[in-house]
Structure formats: C-alpha cells, structure tokens
Image (spheres, helix red, strand yellow):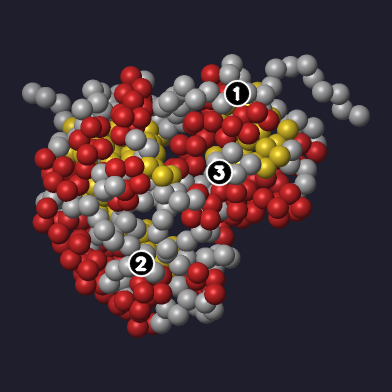
Amino acid sequence: MRTKSLKKNKINVVTLGCSKNVYDSEVLMGQLRANNKEVVHEEEGNVVVINTCGFIANAKEESVNTILEYVQKKEAGAVDKVFVTGCLSERYKPDLEKEIPNVDEYFGTSDLPNLLKALGADYKHELLGERLTTTPKNYAYLKIAEGCDRPCSFCAIPLMRGKHKSTPIEALVTEAEKLAANGVKELILIAQDLTYYGLDLYKKRNLAELLRALVEVEGIEWIRLHYAFPTGFPMDVLEVMRNEPKICNYIDIPLQHISDSVLKSMRRGTTQAKTTKLLQDFREAVPGMTIRTTLIVGYPGETEADFETLKNWVKEMRFERLGCFTYSHEENTHAYTLEDDVPEEIKQQRANEIMEIQSQISWELNQEKIEETFRCIIDRKEGNYFVGRTEHDSPDVDNEVLIDATKYYVKVGEFVDVEITDASDFDLYGAPVTSK
C-alpha cells in the first residue's frame, strides 16, 4: 500500500479549450497563489485540476481523454488527486461521476469558491483582476462578460455558461491597469458575445464606452476585439476603432453560414443581404480593417445549393482571416431535434473546400504586403525564427511574421517595425527596419 508523502502539494492546472478557459485557469491560479499554494500550469504536480471544454465532439473527446490520462496516473501513484472543472463537467457532471468515478471531485463553470475549498484555499473577493497569466508576457486576455443570451440552434454554450453577465467598466479598467503594470502591452477582449456588452448593466450596448476607458490605460498599446455577434452590432464601436490608434483595426465576428435557409434554421437572426451590408459598412467605416470569421459546414439540411452559396460568398467577400468547422450534433440544443443528415465525409470535404478557397485568398492578400512595413509585436523565438504579429493578427489563429534569427536580433515582448520580404499562404517573412 502506497503511503502519502508529507511533501507540500504542488497543484498543476491543465487548460483545454478556448481563451475563456485560459482566462478562468489564470483566475484560479491567481487565487491559489494568493493562498500561498504552489501552483504550475501544465507541468508536473501531485494535485491536478483539469479545466475542460465541452463545446463540440472533438473538444469533449480531448477533455475525456485528458481526464482518463490523469486518472491512470493517479491509479499508478504518479499523482495524488485529480479534480475536474470547466464546461464538460458543468454539462455532464452526473454522467462523468458515473463513468469516471476515480476523479476526486467535479466542479462546474461557476464553482470556483467550492473548487478552491477542495484545494484547501479560500476564495478572496479582494483579488479583483489578480491573475497568474499563462500567455507570453506581452499580451493577455480580458474577459469582459460571461455567458450568452443568443438562441443559436447549434450552440451549447448557454447550457454551460448561463445567461450573459457583463463585468463593470471600472473593474475591467482596474484589471487592465494591473496587467499593464506586469508588462502586458496587448489586451485581447473576449466574451461569448462582445456586442451584447453592457445591456444588462447599463441598459444599452456599451462596448464603445468600455473601449474609450481602456485606451486611457497607460502601457496598453493594442486592444483587440474577439467574438462579436453580427445581429445588433453597435456601430459606434467602428468610430472608436477608426479614431483610436490603440484599437487594432481587427474584429473576430463568427458568421457561421450565409445561406438564408441555413441561417434561419440556425436562429442567427440575420440574412445574407443584412450580413453582406454589415461587412461593407465595416470596411467603409474602417479602411484596411481585418475581418476574421468562422463558418460551420454540414449543418442539418445543408444542401449542395446552400454550400455553393457559401463558397461563392467566401470568394466574393475575400475575408482576411477565416476558419471553418464541421457541424457537431450537440444534445440539448435546438438543432439536436433535426436529423444530422450530412455524412461526416461530406462535412469534411466541404470544410476542406472552404479552406482551399481561403488559402488562395490569403496567399493573394499576403503577396500584396511584400515590401510594406508593419509594426509587429514579437511573441517568441522558435527555432531559427523570431515570431511576431501585425495588428491584423491574433495569437494562435492568424498569420505570423517570421524574422530570421540567424541574421537579425529583435527583443521578445517588444514592438518592432518589420519590412515584409516574402509571403506564403498564412505566414509573412520579414526583416526589422533599422532607423538611419
């Protein structure tokens, strides 16, 4: 029989899923550190907390596999305790407790005080904005709201995250100031739906006012917008983007589809004509703006004609950034009542076709950047390259600027002007511009 050691617990937080989960893990780690707990992120520890994703089939599978991996380590004596939190356990806690009983305890998305208690820590309310960031030192996520009130038929997020709840502007400014004091230069604003921000607190869409407050934070040089919703977009945001140099000319606005019949079934509250007009208004209001979107193919009832409409529209709109996902049939969503009638291989084929079109568009747009100079933030050094980004690129999902480290030196975490010398589908190559 294995005897427990008297050594101090080291808590390893493992994060799966999206940037919202990254943020939640950072808050958890900040609380643990404030309780004088030894905490690491995705390193060795004898106590493991897995922050899971439960969004679509692939993410759920990865979460379950990770739980099983650490349960096996526990059974082998390599770790002492395994706790599970996040979206998967919010959504499937009774099933998980039955199927994987060797986890010490499961917690939902709003169970932070109880999770801390299980880890021998107290929830400290005074820790407003205190986090242990896990991203490179120059950027951090700033979650401005939790939950979602949208009725999209395919999406399980409201089941896991609840109704939309905005964080007050004053609290977000305080958090931004603390991040800036720790060397963060770029804030990436995240929420399930940025465009809804403020409706619950201020009785109006208040994203523009939040942005005006955040640009005043000393040390923050870029502010980037992620996950806007097309219906009811507050157009005053574009005015702030155009007039405030700190607001990146960039927006991530998942559009999901463009066929009117699919949009109606998806309960998106918009049409092809309205969406196209919105994007035209974006580009007129902020010339040179980068629009990132994501699309879903293989939604129930998506016909070849619907898909052709989508393909042609992608060609016409020439998005600067685009990702494509295959539809995942999620229980307890409205779309789950529909027949998942597009075969998996057709879903994948359609996703590949969309990405081939986008690859060509991206290559053409990147060729136009050769000999241009961009202000870049340097995120890291990888192999023989320093890896940076322009204001038109978000970490992990967009293009990167590669600088040959065998020829040039740039400082990680700093801004540098880079002249683009070559370009591929999704990468730019460049040289730092030295002042004469």
Q: Which residue is mark 2?
A: 268
Look at the numbered disc 3 and give the secondary structure of its residue.
Answer: loop
Crowdedness near tag 3: few (<14), some (14–19) or many (≥20) residues, C-alpha within 10 Å:
some
Crowdedness near tag 2: few (<14), some (14–19) or many (≥20) residues, C-alpha within 10 Å:
many
The part of the image, by quadrant, that contains residue 182 is top left
Q: Name the residue at the left extreme.
A: 436
In terms of depth relative to the viewer, which is nearer, 404 or 395?
395
Q: Residue at x 32, y 68 (%)?
A: 269
Q: Picture coordinates of residue 288 (x, y %)? A: 14, 50
Q: Which residue is mark 1?
A: 122
The part of the image, by quadrant, that contains residue 92 is bottom right
Taking 207 as reference, is 268 above or below it?
Answer: below
Q: Are marks 2 and 1 in contact (CB under 8 Å)?
A: no
Q: Residue at x 58, y 65 (%)?
A: 331
Q: Name the residue at the right extreme.
A: 1
Residue 109 tag number: 3
